[in-house]
Image (tube, helix red, strand yellow):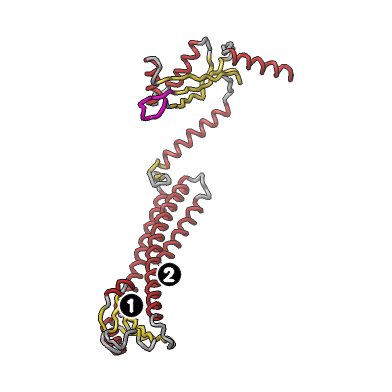
Amino acid sequence: MKMSEYYRQREAEALKEARYYERVPEDLQKAEGAKQMRKWAAQYRKMAEDAEAEEKAEEEAEARAKAEAEAAEKKGESTMKNTTRHITTHSVEEAWNVANELFPCDYLHDSDRSRRAGYDVYYSTSDSITDAWISDLGDRLEVNLPNCETVNVWIEEEGEIAEAEMNAAICEAVQAEMDAEMEAETVALAESDEAIVWDEDGNEVKTVDQMHDEIAVWKAGSEAVKRMKLEPLCTPEVCQRVTLIIDGDYGTEDEKAVFEAIRQGGPGILFELLTRYAETHGIIWGGIFGCKADHYDHGKPEDGKKGHYCVDGFITGRIGEEMSFCSNCADLLNRKHEEHTVRK
């Protein structure tokens, strides 16, 4: 099994565990376990992607070497039938001894062909034999003879087999250690009252005890709402929208000071503006809501102008009090009252 396949398998197992824990979202410890499993799945995914990239690079290198070898074989357009045979050796020295016995003449390292091929190429030095060469492909010597025969002299050193077995054993031991750590952390997480809740980026958020306390407060408030007898402070559906302009360039000094307070995000400044509007217009208000401020530039930003804010909000009248409206709002309210009367 390739390492990338192994990591993908571990990722799938972690995601499976996460989905199992997520089946009971009200269990906070299982929810925490699900988040931890997804963290591990992300780590396995990254390891699998790195392994896949390395494996792909190796496959591309092998394919390139094969294509270069095939192109070299076709060079010369010989009408003779190509044949390939294989010989196995147990050391680099033994492989070169076999190649020397097979090769019909002397040869030298060809730097130009080696640079183009991406591996060492040794070409014939004989004037009469111009289509024979040896390609050093690392795990084998490819001996190309003038009779269109190719002999692959494979190098299978005993040390490489032992190293591969050792690497496999190391990978297995490392994975066993990771599995043991994962299992220990999962058990500790399930048994701990101080388990940490993490967000999607792996940052610590709060403890399970804190979440329990918050849920208890929320449940108590929810039950209290059910027992309350609620009466509105404001006259239902009777309100007026107010829009104010606060100019940072051409307004009064007070207006400019308010502009800066809005820009700096001063707490409650929009509410204070609408409260002041209600007081100066004789409105006995019951509620002010929907406050917002939209900024508009004066010309281009590089001109150095601050621009102005359009401040919007809604003012409702207090129950038992008559609400003052501007002429347009009063006309609209009267029309709605007449339509309601006709419908009745």
N-terminal label among 2 and 1 = 2
Q: Residue at x 42, y 62 (%)?
A: 7
The reply to whether residue 233 is in sight is no
Using the image as rendered, state which of residue 129 and residue 104 is in the foreground.
129
Q: Nearer the viewer, residue 226 or 16?
A: 16
Q: Is residue 67 visible?
A: yes
Q: Is residue 287 above or below residue 281?
A: below
Q: Is residue 25 above or below residue 220?
A: below
Give the numbered dot on residue 139. 1
Residue picked out by circle 2: 1
The Cα atoms of the two marked residues, 2 and 1, are separated by 21 Å
Assign a secondary structure to mark 1: loop
Quadrant (top left, top right, bottom left, bottom right) of the N terminus: bottom left
Q: Which residues are magenta?
A: 298-308
Decide: few, some or many residues near mark 1? Use Cα within 10 Å; few <14, some 14-19, many ≥20: few
Q: Which of labels 2 and 1 is toward the front?
A: 1
